[in-house]
Amino acid sequence: MEKFFSFIEKSPTSYHAVENIRQRLEEEGFLSLEEKDSYLLEAGKSYYVVRNDSSLLAFKLPKNSPKGFLLMASHSDSPCFKLKEEPEAITQKSYVKFNVEKYGGMIDSTWLDRPLSMAGRVVVKEGKELKTKLINFEENLCIIPNVAIHLNREINQGFAYNAQVDLQPLWSGQEDDSLDALLKEKLGNDQEILGKDLFVYNRQSGCFLGKNKEFIGAPRIDDLECAYGTLEGFLQAKAGDYCNVYCIFDNEEVGSSTRQGADSDFLLSNLERITYSLGKREELSQMIANSFLVSADNGHGLHPNHPEKSDSKNYPLLNKGIVIKYHGNQKYTTDAYTGAVIKAICKEAEVPYQIYHNRSDIAGGSTLGNISISHASIPTADIGLAQLAMHSSFETAGSKDLEYLISFSKAFYEKEIE
Ligand code: CO
């Protein structure tokens, strides 16, 4: 669990999550591919490709011609605040605030009165070249203070935070402070900064909670828990007859329709290129039909204070295993067949599973599985782990479930169920 906490801490943004996964894959001997170059692939070798620094696909080619693809997909982003292009524009008296907008749908109140930091990527000009650099301040850089209760007696009666007024982080007490100067200091040089994708994040470390350490708390559990668990299973799985693919997509929290999101050609284009470079151009449709995708994104566990928010029967609990998600209107892709595949794998691997349905009068969330199959129409199921307080800046999950996901993922990638 300490390794998982450390992964979360080192991954304040999707850029950092992908960079940490990339480094891990390099250590494991994976070879880097660039989408702008041609793919010359060799059977038995493992590769990865990154798009726009924040989505990644890794795959292991079997020694023999693969029957199809076995894929698991999660997302690299979490709700947070994004700095605007001119971020220190708001100055009042001796306060300098970051001018931010919301990225994704967060629980606003959980971002106030706690130490926040900033991370992301910047683009600098080096000679004639534009270079991207990751940046992470890893220090208590800013805070969003609440208004005192004496000045806002209504706050406990259900208060709506206004994003432009109430949620702007306080950063400095010196009016002439500029973020670019701070960034240059952090980068250790005086290069011109021409682009920024910077985010404010919660600095709190992951920890165990509860009398018997049965719970964990951390920022970004949705969806870094699935990103981490499926990666471990992917790396541990022995080679079989399929091409195993690990996917992590950015921008799930804002609808996935970006160049690197699940609603792009990133997956399909790479599956095509893998198939073609193995000399199986005619067999692409056959390969896709003979594949299976598991979309892994966390689900809502039964809430201790609000059990009425869950379905009367199909509710998951923390520490009780993989959650298989179903939805009548197909926001979750699981059907009788794909759900049966997941259950059979769980039984074989002795991993407990449980079922999630929304209450029939609550719309619930959505995820990337059904978006992804609109591009590559692979048989798909939606799973996840049960958690509480989804999209809080600090979420809660069960301390046993990550191991269940790792065991499930390994068993999935070693699939023997046909
Ligand atoms: Co999610």
Image (cartoon, helix red, strand yellow):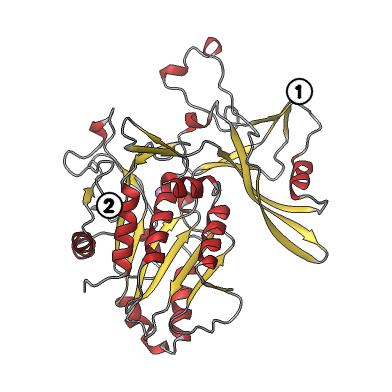
How far across and how far down the image is residue 303, in percent? 29, 34
User: Can residue 236 be seen at all in this image of the molecule?
Assistant: yes
Q: Which residue is mark 2?
A: 322
Q: Nearer the viewer, residue 107 or 341?
A: 341
Say whether residue 76 is left or right of residue 198.
left
Q: Secondary structure at mark 1?
A: loop
Q: Residue furthest left?
A: 313
Work out whether 334 lies above or below 279: above
Amino acid type at circle 1 is Ser
Does label 2 or label 1 sit earlier along the sequence?
1
Amino acid type at circle 2 is Ile
> Residue 94: which numbered mark, if any?
1
Is there a contact, CB below 8 Å, between mark 2 and mark 1? no
Q: Residue at x 34, y 36 (%)?
A: 213
Instruction: Tell which tag, 2 or 1, sits nearer the viewer.
Output: 2
Q: Nearer the viewer, residue 401 or 106?
A: 401
Q: Nearer the viewer, residue 22 or 361?
A: 22
Say whether residue 34 is left or right of residue 273.
right
Work out whether 242 lies above or below 357: below
User: Can residue 331 be seen at all in this image of the molecule?
Assistant: no
How far across and how far down the image is residue 87, in percent? 70, 40
Q: Secondary structure at mark 2?
A: strand
How far across and how far down the image is residue 362, in percent? 28, 40
The C terminus appears in which quarter of the rendering? Answer: bottom left
